[in-house]
Amino acid sequence: GGRLLLRAQRSAAEVAVSTLDSTVSGARQVAVEAVKVFEGIATLNATGTSSGTTLTLDTVKADNTAFASNHAAIRTRLGRDGDASFHLLSGVEVRAPGDLSLAQDWNLASARAGGEAGALTLIAGGDLKLDANLSDGFSVATPFSGSAPATLLADASWSYRLVGGADAAAADPLATVMDAGDVRLAAGKLVRSGSGDIDVAAGRDIVLASNTSAIYTAG
């Protein structure tokens, strides 16, 4: 069977899905992506304190962990206790009115709030500049750990939506404005997921700076 994904914004303790009264036939998985939106961001770092236009992965992970403490209550409210096919995912949407730069590696391998991998959406009104590695599903964010290749992990991985030249007024997170911006992956950097989906959209170009730049999913 397929997978049904429902996206809705979340508050500190709830997600904006009132009921799941419909019958879903044939799906192997029904997932609710509970989305936290971070507005006005220009730089993404890995560690430290978020401030102004800088957002850190530490902040994202702490926010997802805090929200996950409400998962059990939300499942009960939606009538999904004991339903192994139902998943409540951490959705993270980062919006930049202009350029958005990933300045330090984001390794999501330990980001499993509520025991689930999530979905990361990076939306830049200008260029989305991936100047560092974005990775999940592997032991390290880089291609190698010392001299050994990074190890593929067995659990489910995060999915990504990466958008440059985004249409901020559109409901579709992958919508773009013609010629408004690129998605640029720096030389020697990678965007990868062990088993998640990777969607990339640009109003202008998707640019891999060299033959050592790579975007892929292993699963």
Image (cartoon, rainbow, N blue to C red):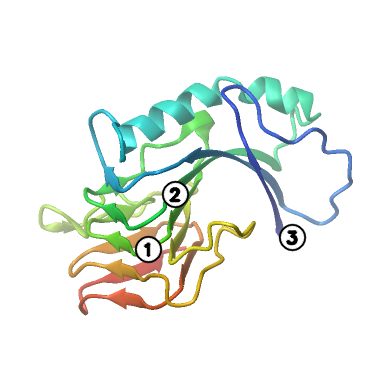
Residues at marks 3 and 2, CA–CA distance in whole angstroms: 33 Å
Residues at marks 1 and 3, CA–CA distance in whole angstroms: 38 Å
Q: Amino acid at mark 2?
A: Arg
Q: Residue at x 62, y 25 (%)?
A: 71
Q: Earlier in the sequence, mark 3 or mark 2?
A: 3
On the picture, is 151 further left or further right than 157?
Answer: left
The relative height of residue 98 versus residue 200 in the rendered view (above or below) is above
Q: Amino acid at mark 3?
A: Gly
Image disc number at residue 164: none
On the picture, is 200 further left or further right than 7?
Answer: left
The relative height of residue 169 versus residue 211 in the rendered view (above or below) is above
Disc 3: which residue: 1
Residue 57 point in image, percent of width and height: 33, 38
Instruction: Indicate the secondary structure of the residue bearing disc 1.
Output: loop
Residues at marks 1 and 2, CA–CA distance in whole angstroms: 11 Å
Badge 1 local density, few (<14 within 10 Å), some, or many (20+)? many
**Which is closer to the viewer, label 1 or label 3?**
1
Residue 69 point in image, percent of width and height: 55, 20
Image disc number at residue 95: 2
The one nearer the camera, 132 or 89, is 132
On the picture, is 24 further left or further right than 61?
Answer: right
Q: Residue at x 22, y 79 (%)?
A: 211
Q: Which residue, as the protein is rendered here, is positioned at the far left?
A: 147
Q: Earlier in the sequence, mark 1 or mark 2?
A: 2
Residue 153 point in image, percent of width and height: 38, 49
